Structure formats: structure tokens, C-alpha cells
Amino acid sequence: MDFHGIDLNLLVAFDALMNERNVTRAAARVGVSQPAMSAALSRLRQLLGDPLFLRSAGGLLPTPRAREVAEPLAQALQQIESTLVGKPVFVPAKAAVTFNLGLSDYPAFVLLPALLQALSKQAPGVSLNVRSFTDRDDAVDLLDAGTIDAAIGVAPTQPESRISTRAVLRDEFVTIVASDHPAARRGMTMRTFLALPHVLVSPEGDRHGLVDQALAQRGKKRTLALTLPHMFAVPAVVARTRMTATVMKRVALHSSASRRLVMFPPPVAIPDAVFVLIWHRRSEASPAQAWLRELIESTAASL
């Protein structure tokens, strides 16, 4: 590979293609024509000896080689920009920008209202565009595609060097029954727990959750009567039936049915649920996004 006389604009083009996954949008992003962007892609392929991007129904799909070089090239461009142009300053009170935030159900219900309240006070000109996701690994794909600036959800299944995470929310599990349920008076023993029909929250459709894993370790099994993808629907279901469910405590407390529920510690040990802030390392040099991440952390800490 010969780097003699390399055009840095090719790296800018690559970064735009990696973020936009579309030649036309990438061209608009860097202010060149579509043919010029296509020519830049051709030169990049020749320079790196790899197709880099393959056409797919969802846009340009980066090859493993493209994913490998994306982060170091983005960081290099940021360092060059900060050296030549100087570090930009982000003033929240004067900013007029939209952040794209990926949220799973729990932070959308528990954290988002408080975050919007903090935004209205500190940065009234800043708006949020929220993108929902259910599969924990969807956040990584959305960050890679540049669709979102950050995400809050359960940690991805596999650690990735280009992806940063930091725990921001934690919640304990409780077992709930309707307040007029006989178990509400007797208490939630293991015998009662196993005798009741259960509701399972499973966004990904798996019928073997944390409770089932804990029970299996003790050679026990519960009866599932209902599996739901949406956790915040569960308290209302339990309040109107003879079912029980084991959910995060804030899920029960935030429900309109909370006054018709009784909460017990689960009869099996279940680790706390942890939700993390997730972001791409290429955004770490951005003052605006660094400020957003700090605001999310401080808001979560206040809950």
C-alpha cells in the first residue's frame, strides 16, 4: 500500500459513507456531487484493496475491513480537525440542535421524562429524536450506522472496542400480585409462587427468563400463562387477574395500576437489572455529545 500523496479528502469521504450508508447522502454531507463521491469510493477501494461497501436493501453494507478501519480513521480526522480548527465550544443554553437517542422501553418510561425536564431548563433549544429498540444488539447497529448519537438499554451481548458503555440505571426485581389476591394476605412463599400462573416479560420472545434460570438451578419450574414483549403492560394485567409477575420495581411503581398491586421480594435470588449508556467512540471528541452523555448520567443519578 502506497500512502505517498494520499488525499485526506478520501478519508473524509469514507467517514461520510460509513455514517450515511448512502452515496447521495454522503455526498451532500461533505458538499460534493454524487459522481465525485462515487469516484472517491472507487479510489478508496483501490487504496485499501477491499470493496469496503456492498449494496443491500437497507443501503450500503460495510465490509469487515471497513468496520475495522472506521473508528481509527474517524478519530484521526477528529484530531486533525481539532488541531487545525481548534476545539469547538458547546453552549447548552444557546444551542439549537437535535440529538438522536436510542431507548429501550425501561429508560423511555423511567428516565426520559426527567431527561426532558432537565433539557428544558438547561438547553431549551435542544430537541430529541427518540428511536426505540428491543434487541440489545440493535443499539450497536444503530450507532454504527450513525442513526443515533447514543443509546440507553441493556448492555450488548458482546463487547466491541469501538463501542463504549457505562452503567447509569439499576433496579431491583419484585414479585407482584393484585391487592385483592389471597397471596397478598398470605405472603409470597416459594410454594405459593410456584402454584400461581405467571406473566413473563420477553421483548425477544424467549420463554425462559431470569426467574426461570434461578428456579432451574433449584430444580424447580413455574407455570407461564402469558408472555408479553412490553414490560409496562404487565402491572395492569396482574392487577385484573389472578396471575403474578416478577418485574423491575420502577415498572410497578410507574404503572397506573400500582395502587391495586402488592409487591414482595421474589422467593428466588435475582440480580438487579442494569441499564447502560452506549455510544460510539467516534463521538467522544464531540463537545455536544459529551455534554448529552453527562446530562443523561446526572439525570439518571438523580432518580
Image: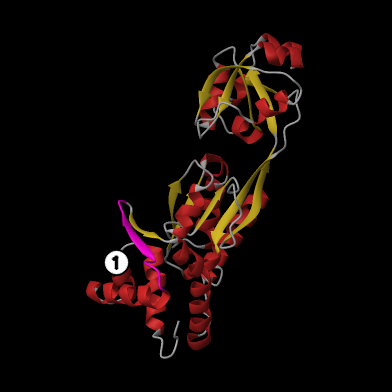
Whether the magenta-drawn stretch holds residue 149 is answered as no
Q: Position of residue 13 (x, y in %)?
A: 36, 74
User: Quick check: 194 above or below 11?
Assistant: above
Identify the magenta region. Answer: 49-57
Q: Position of residue 93 (x, y in %)?
A: 50, 67
Q: Is residue 53 visible?
A: yes
Side of 165 where 218 appears, left or right: right
User: Quick check: 101 above or below 180?
Assistant: below
Out of 256 and 242, give the one closest to the viewer.
242
Out of 31 and 118, give the one closest to the viewer.
31
Side of 45 where 288 appears, left or right: right
Q: Residue visible at 53% across and 40% down?
A: 109
Give, as a three-letter code, the residue at label 1. Val
Q: Position of residue 268 (x, y in %)?
A: 75, 25
Q: How is the image coloured?
A: secondary structure
Q: Position of residue 255 (x, y in %)?
A: 56, 30
Query: Which residue in the protein does label 1 denote?
Result: 23
Side of 193 where 37 appears, left or right: left
State which quadrant residue 256 falls in. Answer: top right
Out of 285 and 204, give the one closest to the viewer.
204
Q: Residues within 10 Å of mark 1 (few under 14, many from 20)?
A: many
User: Quick check: 1 above or below 45?
Assistant: below
